[in-house]
């Protein structure tokens, strides 16, 4: 359930009204910074005689040649090849906003050593000396040098921009008038540049602190492939921008967002990765205000002529990508992640912002949602429908209509007279319930949540100090100030079972509309001069508002279980670090093929920027998908991390069995494939949780030295073992699948046909086909049987699908715990097993000896793909026992060996010898 003004927006009208949302030309701080770029009259100089070296950082002044107002720069070295650059006013009129709560703890500082330089420069290096900060004084510039190569230059284009806090507007006007400056001239300049007031439509943004924007450029040498800065409905590889067409990071409620557009939508992660052969780096721009990012890639030049005396020398020009960051306020605070591999960059970013929270197992199953399931009988009927049609699912969702008059933490007594009874029905099926809780609170003095929040001063304020009020689903609403730690603590307490009447321990939470969405507000959101805790304006922290709500919600769910149970929280709005608190999705998509197709690059971009637990609404939230599109979307969604069907209220019902027997069967098969692979999914999420490796990966992550993979976005890897190419075109009879790796072998997961890597293959597809390939050299753990939900599959046996590499080997892992508690952390109650196939022996061994977890599960089936000849004997061996021969089946046509009816303990060491 999402967006402003469904009263005015027809479901069929998908076009975004650009009059509601601003493009760059209507954003004043963008115009001001572009004006400086054009004038080229702003030059900064580093005062290297001001350098001081403290315990944590090296500091020096930067001064703008004309204004002579000093800035102070600080450079930090951080463990694992990370550097931090902060630039702030040396003596601001009052403190400028700095983002807190995103960087997980105080980074471990590595002392930087000052080494050689000349009178106009200074060189800092880490202890290893492998990366150098070369600071040039005039004009101010920083080169990051790795070995002998300049990897990155900062301010080489002279786009450093810093607007100093000024005296209040009225005082300034008086002073200007005292100097006989024409008031009309001043007003014209102000209106054009939005210095103290900025108009958009009927809204006027009054800026108490005046203009406060910042900007800086980064030139990435040798790089022409850059990724990241979600959320946009755009390609995975970031495109060059042009004037007025920057990527916008500004969290907005955009109903039926336009695809292939750089406008900001629900979430913002100001983090960008660049990749080239042999190196990956990242830039994390820690700023929560509205941010614009310009990108310009200059390809490698053939040759340039450089005069050298009387001769002309040919010189190769490397490609270069320039990144220009511009934010409305705050300070410059940027982390430079120097890799050098993709895996290193993921770990560096997670060191700063945290890893993906370990999800409860049920949340990796299928979720069923619409706006809205009408009442308890509707829930009961839909739940029974899944059982009747033998389709597994784990979670039923309720949107806003389940509440009493759109008051969160309540139940509509007519529709849901006995919510605990309804939850007990779901519990009996080992299923869960998710309900919605948005940040807007109905302004009703008889509503206890509102009354208490108002009394405690927990609501966002207007610039005049009154409680901010806006229109959202309940009508007139106020907004909880989640930036205040006391509000978050109080809000977390609302989830306690005695407080949230009718809730049980199988109820989990969905945070929606938390950009925040404000109907009839500027761009359907909150006025920028609204005030938060600490008297900070909303403009300073807009993009982090939803992050704070998800943080508070997750903490509330943990508290209600006295710290024992993992939460599940889905949030529409997000920021860097949101991965610590749960899942996100791509918002109000539309039931069209193009939205199915764009979901892949959108999810890949989220995945590489820390948020592995992400998905897109299956079927499209808006509109009515035809049966073919719905089937294809289920097939795609089954191989994406967060798997939820969802639809808006005035769409036709689309439960999986409503499209005829044929399509019901195809949807059932897709969902069952998801459930069969849950051991692999869960193991991947554990890897994301402890090692920060994305679950869903663009090909370039797994094949960083293959240029052909760098722009691929219609297929992806799940972990390192599975390649997925969803079908995203109607009436498709074949798809072109690029199988990377010239020394790789790939196996069709259904037919077991083998394909050599390093080229594109045409794969025939029918409506029952989703091309999935297992990489040679991998072992994928699966379940042999699928239950009604994940809870029914706890003790069901495992299968191992062993796909041999060209060298006849394979490895894989299985992670197992209770699936719901924190015992894996607190008591090391987990199993982490490693499977290895080498020299015709498959072994199961312990991958982490710290873990202990009793499991009755057995490996019942083993399938070996790519075995070139039929064995004469297969035996199993475990410590203290003689080899036991086991029956087998060998198919020479597909080169597969099948072992059935085994009983090998999943948690014990054993070996299978193939002779």
Image (cartoon, rainbow, N blue to C red):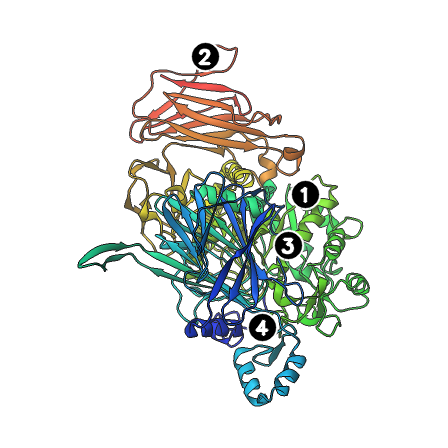
Relative to 888, 17 lies left or right: right
Position of the C terminus, as image quadrant, is top left
Q: Which residue is mark 1?
A: 427
Relative to 894, 660 lies left or right: right
SS at mark 3?
loop
User: Which of marks 4 and 3 precedes in the sequence?
Assistant: 3
User: Which of marks 1 and 2 precedes in the sequence?
Assistant: 1
Disc 4 vs disc 2: which is toward the camera? 4
Q: CA gap, disc 4 to disc 1?
A: 55 Å
User: Which of marks 2 and 4 precedes in the sequence?
Assistant: 4
Residue 193, above or below 725: below
The answer to which of 730 and 36 lies nearer the viewer is 36
Residue 815, above or below 250: above
Numbered badge on residue 883 = 2
Q: CA gap, disc 2 to disc 3?
A: 60 Å
Q: CA gap, disc 2 to disc 1?
A: 44 Å
Give coordinates of residue 522: x percent, y percent: 59, 74
Relative to 203, 533 lies left or right: right
User: Which of marks 3 and 2 precedes in the sequence?
Assistant: 3
Asked if the residue at tag 2 contacts the one at tag 4, i.e. Cβ–Cβ closer than 8 Å, the answer is no
Q: CA gap, disc 3 to disc 4?
A: 22 Å
Disc 2 vs disc 1: which is toward the camera? 2
The answer to which of 164 and 837 lies nearer the viewer is 164
Q: Residues within 10 Å of mark 4 (few under 14, many from 20)?
A: many
SS at mark 2?
loop
Asked if the residue at tag 4 contacts the one at tag 3, i.e. Cβ–Cβ closer than 8 Å, the answer is no
Residue lying farthest left? 310
């Amino acid at each position: 359930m999402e967006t402003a003004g469904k009263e005015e927006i027809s479901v069929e009208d998908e076009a975004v009204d650009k009059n509601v949302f601003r493009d760059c030309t209507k954003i004043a701080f963008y115009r001001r910074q572009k004006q400086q770029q054009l004038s080229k009259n702003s030059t900064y100089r580093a005062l290297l005689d001001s350098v001081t070296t403290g315990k944590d950082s090296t500091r020096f002044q930067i001064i703008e040649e004309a204004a002579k107002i000093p800035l102070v720069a600080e450079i930090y070295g951080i463990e694992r090849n990370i550097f931090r650059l902060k630039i702030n006013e040396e003596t601001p009129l009052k403190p400028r906003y700095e983002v807190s709560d995103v960087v997980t703890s105080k980074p471990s500082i590595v002392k930087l050593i000052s080494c050689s330089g000349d009178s106009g420069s200074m060189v800092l290096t880490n202890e290893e000396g492998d990366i150098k900060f070369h600071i040039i004084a005039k004009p101010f510039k920083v080169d990051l040098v790795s070995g002998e190569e300049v990897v990155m230059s900062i301010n080489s284009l002279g786009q450093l921009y810093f607007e100093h806090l000024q005296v209040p507007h009225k005082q300034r006007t008086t002073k200007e008038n005292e100097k006989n400056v024409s008031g009309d001239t001043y007003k014209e300049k102000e209106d054009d540049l939005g210095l103290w007031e900025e108009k958009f439509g009927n809204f006027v943004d009054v800026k108490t602190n005046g203009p406060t924007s910042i900007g800086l450029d980064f030139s990435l040498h040798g790089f022409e492939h850059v990724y990241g800065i979600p959320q946009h409905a755009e390609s995975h590889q970031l495109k060059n921008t042009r004037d007025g067409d920057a990527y916008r990071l500004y969290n907005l409620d955009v109903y039926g967002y336009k695809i292939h557009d750089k406008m900001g939508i629900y979430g913002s992660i100001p983090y960008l990765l660049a990749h080239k052969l042999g190196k990956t780096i990242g830039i994390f721009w820690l700023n929560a205000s509205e941010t614009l990012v310009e990108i310009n890639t200059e390809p490698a030049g053939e040759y340039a002529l450089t005069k050298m005396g009387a001769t002309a020398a040919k010189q190769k020009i490397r490609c270069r990508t320039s990144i220009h960051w511009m934010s409305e306020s705050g300070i410059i605070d940027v982390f430079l992640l120097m890799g050098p591999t993709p895996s290193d960059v993921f770990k560096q970013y997670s060191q700063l912002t945290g890893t993906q929270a370990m999800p409860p197992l049920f949340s990796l199953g299928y979720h069923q949602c619409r706006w809205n399931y009408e009442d308890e009988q509707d829930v009961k009927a839909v739940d029974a429908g899944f059982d009747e049609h033998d389709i597994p699912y784990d979670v039923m969702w309720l949107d806003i209509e389940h509440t009493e008059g759109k008051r969160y933490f309540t139940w509509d007594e007519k529709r849901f007279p006995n919510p605990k009874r309804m939850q007990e029905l779901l519990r009996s099926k080992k299923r869960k319930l998710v309900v919605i809780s948005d940040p807007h609170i109905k302004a009703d003095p008889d509503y206890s949540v509102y009354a208490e929040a108002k009394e405690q001063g927990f609501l966002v304020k207007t610039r005049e100090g009154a409680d901010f009020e806006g229109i959202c689903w309940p009508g007139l609403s106020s907004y909880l100030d989640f930036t205040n730690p006391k509000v978050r603590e109080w809000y977390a307490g609302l989830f306690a079972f005695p407080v949230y009447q009718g809730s049980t321990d199988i109820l989990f939470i969905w945070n929606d509309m938390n950009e925040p969405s404000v109907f009839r507000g500027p761009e359907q959101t909150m006025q920028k001069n609204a005030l938060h805790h600490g008297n900070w304006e909303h403009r300073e922290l807009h993009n982090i508002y939803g992050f704070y709500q998800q943080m508070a919600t997750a903490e509330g769910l943990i508290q209600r279980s006295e710290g024992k149970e993992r939460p599940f929280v889905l949030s529409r709005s997000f920021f860097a670090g949101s991965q610590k608190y749960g899942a996100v999705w791509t918002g109000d998509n539309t039931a069209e093929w193009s939205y199915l197709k764009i979901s892949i690059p959108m999810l890949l971009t989220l995945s590489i920027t820390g948020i592995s637990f992400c998905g897109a609404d299956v079927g499209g939230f808006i509109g009515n998908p035809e049966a073919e599109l719905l089937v294809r979307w289920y097939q795609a969604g089954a191989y994406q991390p967060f798997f939820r069907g969802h639809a808006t209220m005035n769409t036709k019902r689309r439960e999986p069995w409503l499209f005829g027997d044929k399509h019901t069967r195809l949807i059932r098969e897709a969902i069952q494939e998801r459930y069969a692979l849950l051991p692999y999914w869960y193991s991947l999420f554990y890897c994301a949780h402890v090692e920060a490796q994305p679950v869903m990966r663009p090909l370039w992550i797994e094949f960083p030295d293959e240029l052909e993979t760098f722009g691929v976005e219609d297929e992806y890897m799940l972990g390192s073992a599975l390649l997925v190419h969803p079908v995203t075109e109607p009436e498709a009879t074949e798809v072109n699948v690029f199988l990377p790796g010239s020394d790789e072998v790939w196996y069709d997961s259904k037919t077991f046909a083998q394909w050599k890597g390093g080229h594109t293959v045409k794969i025939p597809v029918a409506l029952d086909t989703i091309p999935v390939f297992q990489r040679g050299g991998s072992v994928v753990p699966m379940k042999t049987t699928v239950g009604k939900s994940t809870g029914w599959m706890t003790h069901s046996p495992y299968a191992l699908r062993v796909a041999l590499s060209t060298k006849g080997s394979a490895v894989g892992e299985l992670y197992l715990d209770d699936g719901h508690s924190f015992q894996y952390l607190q008591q090391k109650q987990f199993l982490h097993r490693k499977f290895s196939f080498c020299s015709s022996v498959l072994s199961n061994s312990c991958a982490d000896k710290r873990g202990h977890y009793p499991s009755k599960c057995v490996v019942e089936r083993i399938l070996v793909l790519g075995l070139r000849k039929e064995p004469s004997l297969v035996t199993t061996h475990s410590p203290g026992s003689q080899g036991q021969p086991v029956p087998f089946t060998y198919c020479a046509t597909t080169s597969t060996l099948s072992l059935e009816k085994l009983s090998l303990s999943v948690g014990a060491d054993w070996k299978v010898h193939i002779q």
